[in-house]
Every structure is written in C-alpha cells, then in structure tokens.
Amino acid sequence: MNPRRILAVTRKSLSQFRHDKRTLGFVVGMPLLMVIAFGYTFGGEVHDVRTFVVNEDQGPFADRLIANLTGDTLDVNRVSDPDFAIEEVRAGRAWAALVFPANFSTDLQARRATIEVVLDGTSPPVVAALLGTVRAAAERTFSGVGGVAALSLSTDYLYGSANTRFIDSFAPGVIALAVLLATTVFSVIIVVREKSAGMLERLFSTPLRSVEFVVGHAVALCVIAFFQSTVVLAAALLIFQVQVVGSIPLAFGILVLFAVGNQGLGMMLSAAARNELQAVQFIPLIIFPSLLLTGVFFPIEAIPAEFRVLSYGVPLTYAGGALRSIMLRGWGVGDIALDLAVLTVYTALTLLGAAALVRRQA
Amino acid sequence: MAKLPPERVPAIVCGGLSKRFGGVEALRGLSLVVPRGVTFGLLGPNGAGKTTSIRLWLGLTAPSAGTAFVLGKRIPPRTVLSRIGYMPQDLAVYPDLTVEENLALFGRLVGMDEGAIDRRTDEVLRLVDIAERRGDLVSTLSGGMKRRTSLAAALLHDPDLLLLDEPTVGMDPELRAAFWSYFEERTRRGRTVLITTHYMEEAGRCDLVGLLHRGRVLAHGTPVEVKERTGTSNLDDAFLALVRGQRAGGG
C-alpha cells in the first residue's frame, strides 16, 4: 500500500465534491432537514380537530362539560342546529358533531346520560384523540359527583367504523405515495439520460416539438402508471383487505391523473439536473414533504399549525385526500371536485412547464 | 432579393452570425454561403466554432447576433427540419434500442411512412455495412458500428441537406472511401453535404471548404483556390499559413 496513492484518491474525491456544490449541500443539508422534519411532524400530537358542539341541555351539566373541553386537541365550534353540525361532518369539513340532548342533566342525575357523537371515522388517530378528549373532560367535570360512570358516548360513524384499522386510513395515502415516487423518479431519470447522452439535441434536430416530446413520454409512462396503479391497488385490496366503500375505477382514475402530473414534475426537475447523480438527489426532496406534510400516515391535524399551511402546497395532499374520500367515505366525483380540480391544474402546469424547459436542455 | 427557384436557393447563407456562451465567444460574425449540390467541408481545430455553427443552423440554440437562412428559411428553420439530416459528434442513437428501432424512430419523426422506412432501412444499412446487425441492440455493437448506425439514421430520409459533425472519426479507410463516393453520388443528385472535420487531408475531397479559426472564417473556396491563395501544397499548411497571417495582421 502506497500512502501517496491512497491520499491521491482521497484528494480526488474531495475535489470532486468541491466542484459539485449541490451534492455537497445535499450531503450536509438533507440529514439535517430529515431530523427537523421528522421531529416536528411525527413527534406532534393531534391538534385542532374541528368539532361542532350542539348543546340542547335544559340543565347546567352539559355547559360545564363543554367548558372543560380545553386544550388544543379539539377546535370546538358551538352551534345550535344539530343537522347543520352533522352535515358539516358529512361534507368532510369537521371530524365530529357532539350533541348534548335536552334532558342531559336530568339523565345524568338518573345515571343514564348519553352524548351523541357523530363521527368521521376514517382516521383512527383522530377518533382516538377526539373520544379521549371528551372522556377526559367528563372525568374532570364529574369526578366529584361520580357522574362519569353514569355517562356514555353513543357513537355514530358516518364514515368508517369502530373497526376501521390504522392501515385502512393510511393505505390510500401510501398508494398515492408509491405512485408519486415511481413516476417522478422514473421520468427525471429518463429525461436526464436523454440529455446526458446527447439524444435531446438529436431529437430536436427533427421536426419534433417539445410538447410532443413531453406528451409522448407522458403517454408511455401512463401505460406504466396504469399497470403500477393496478398492482398497488390490488395488493392493498387482496393482501391487506383494505376497506373500500367507494368506486375503485374512480380511485384508479385519480391515480393515473396524479401519475401524469408527476411525470411532468419529473421532466421539469430534470431541467435542473446535469447528470443522473444530481437527478437522484431530487428523490428525498419529493419524498419528505410528501411523507410528512400530507397526512399519509398521520392526519394533517397532527402537523404543527405553522407547517400545516405548507401541506396545501403539496399535490399528494389532494391525491391522498381524494383517494381516502373515495375509498373510506364512498364519495363520488362531485364530492372530490376540489381535489380533482387541483390535480388537473397540477398536471396541466407540470406538463406545460416540462415542455417549456425540456427544449432548452437540448 | 430576387426570388430564386427552390433548387437554386443556397443550402445555407449566414451573415454576421455570432454566439456567446457567458464570457466565451464561440462564433464571431460568421458569414458564409453554402450552395446547393456541393460537398462543403467546414474545417478547423477543436473549438473553432464548427459544432456551434451547426447547432445554430438547426435552431438548437439562438444566435447572439446575426442570422442565417437554411434551405431558404430563417433560423430556427422549423419548417425544413424534415429535409435536413444531422449526425452529431456524440453518439446519438439509443443504446437500448435495436439498430432498426433507432432508424424507425428518426424516420417517423421526419414524417416518413412505414413502407418507406422499411425500404430505406435496407438501403442505408447496406451502405454503412451493418445490414446483418439490424435486429441487434446498439449497446452490443462496436464503437465504429454505433457511429455508422447514427449516420444511417441521418441518411434515412435522403435529406436535401446533410449536416455531419466529424462523421469519419474512428472509421476505417475502406469505409471512409465508401462514404465519400456516396457523398459524391448525392451531390450529383443536387443534394448538399456539409461535413465538419479537423482532418485537413480528408477535406481535399470536398467541392468547397471554409477554414474556421476561433469563430471566424479565415478563407473559403475550392481546396485548390485556398492552397493557391496561401502558396501551399496542402490544406494543413494552408491553415497554418492563414493563422500565422492573421496573427501577424493583429487579428
């Protein structure tokens, strides 16, 4: 072993790093970003669960209990119309409606009081946090009077059920995440490979237009996305028996639309990568916001409020949200119109962006 | 400008064509006419601006100043791209496609129908002498065969203007001779071939040459004219004499 030769190899590697500032930044910055992001989003408890409270109680006890629904787990909104409260849950704008009946106080004294809880049960962590908070408030309110034993929660699940498993709630998001990763990474690498091999230049010396190049690739990748979506959906349904109450073709359509948008994104990102090494660095940049900010594993309510606004800028929020609504709530096209609109705009913008950028790379 | 019949419109006309990349001036006011039906050799050392000129003519990059007309169309010459064949210096075929799949792709991109693609694939693969490998993946071919595939893709649609960037690098003399006779046959049919090369002796077979140095044309004309003007016996010496003359002239 010759130390001078060893040192020569070491110096060569460090010099290569020095010349590639982006890789240097990636190596140092990415672990830091990971630790911070995971710490904030996975360490957090569920907050601000939007809940409507309807108090029809003639006596004093419901008011006392409601006053004890403190802390930041629930975002309590008091309304007088129970139908309105339930409709908000049905529309996906709130997780629960708590209805205290007119004879709540007298029933409590007779040791047979109930609170009617109308729930969106599609997210077990949210349901657990919500019911836990209500029980804790009851404990605090009535511990002296021994009223807790006399109180029961009558749960009515609009979506999902007490049997909804954690895997049911995160499967739609994970399916969308799998499609996101595979399609984006694939299209980044395909375009970068064409660029680094001088093929883009050769292609654009023919009458080929950049939009034709982008759409041609998107169609090819769409065929692949079609098989990919079939495989992930089939695996979720057959191996894990994931709960699906809605339309599978609609879920499939959402996945394919999302896949095409991701291909556009991949082709846009490839504009910023000079080689395959740099292209690979985009992968965590796509994974982390998608994993942490979009409620794939944990509800968006578990993300600190100051980060939560970011989640509305990540397309997976809409794809995962739409899939969850279709698979767990049985919603149709009309109900997921917003998600569908956002995904359509995302797809159009990324494809146009890709067409604009791809030719400059030839 | 009086309207010329299409067959008499020069293949390439450029005036004051310049291209800067950051602080580097790759092309400095290139003015040149390449008539129809000739083999034109664009000669010069590496970095003279040969590839930049071709990229500008194809509309792959925009000039910093000046303009050019290719087959009568101002650059970028989008409407005539299907009448141009281009073989870049880099290997520009897909290694993970077969020889004939590569040719079919480029044939379709220039608007050939499937029958014509089939017919011409036979012809051009015989010409470049890799007909027996047409079903093989390009990645399994030797370096020379890959370049011949790339040339075949440029020839497939029998273009009016063929732009070949250093086409004969890495080719054996026998094949090189076959190419030159093919180019001569093409020009007899009124087609134009523009070749860049830094092999000066090879350029002696061109009808016309343009000598490029640091983004400028030092001389152009027939090889004989250029040699006579510089009082030299070959193009290598002619080039060196012109460079020395330019330096002495403070250019």
Image (cartoon, coloured by chain):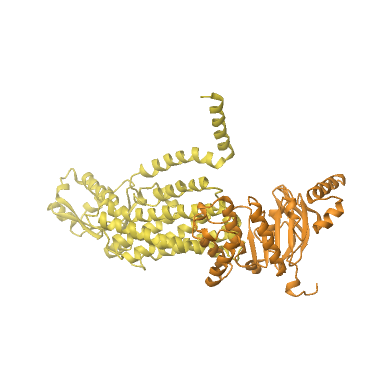
**Observer-nearest residue: A279 or A348?**
A279
Q: Position of residue B221 (x, y in %)?
A: 81, 59
Circle count: 0
Letter of the orange chain: B
Q: Colour of chain A?
A: yellow
> What residue lies at 37% left-to-right and 58% top-to-bottom?
A228
> What residue lies at 42% left-to-right and 43% top-to-bottom?
A37
**Observer-nearest residue: B20 or A242?**
B20
Residue A147 visible, this orientation: no
Residue A98, picture quadrant? bottom left
* A79 sits left or right of B87 in the view: left
Residue B232 visible, this orientation: yes
Extreme left residue here? A110
- Vertical order, A123 against B127 (above or below): above
* B228 sits left or right of A64 in the view: right
- Vertical order, A17 against B249 (above or below): above
* A75 sits left or right of B84 in the view: left
Quarter containing the C terminus of chain A: bottom right
- Vertical order, A277 against B39 (above or below): above
Residue B9, picture quadrant? bottom right
Q: Position of residue A147 (x, y in %)?
A: 16, 48
Q: Position of residue A325 (x, y in %)?
A: 33, 61
Q: Where is residue A222 in the image (x, y as percent from the top left)?
A: 43, 62
**Observer-nearest residue: A223 or A296?**
A223
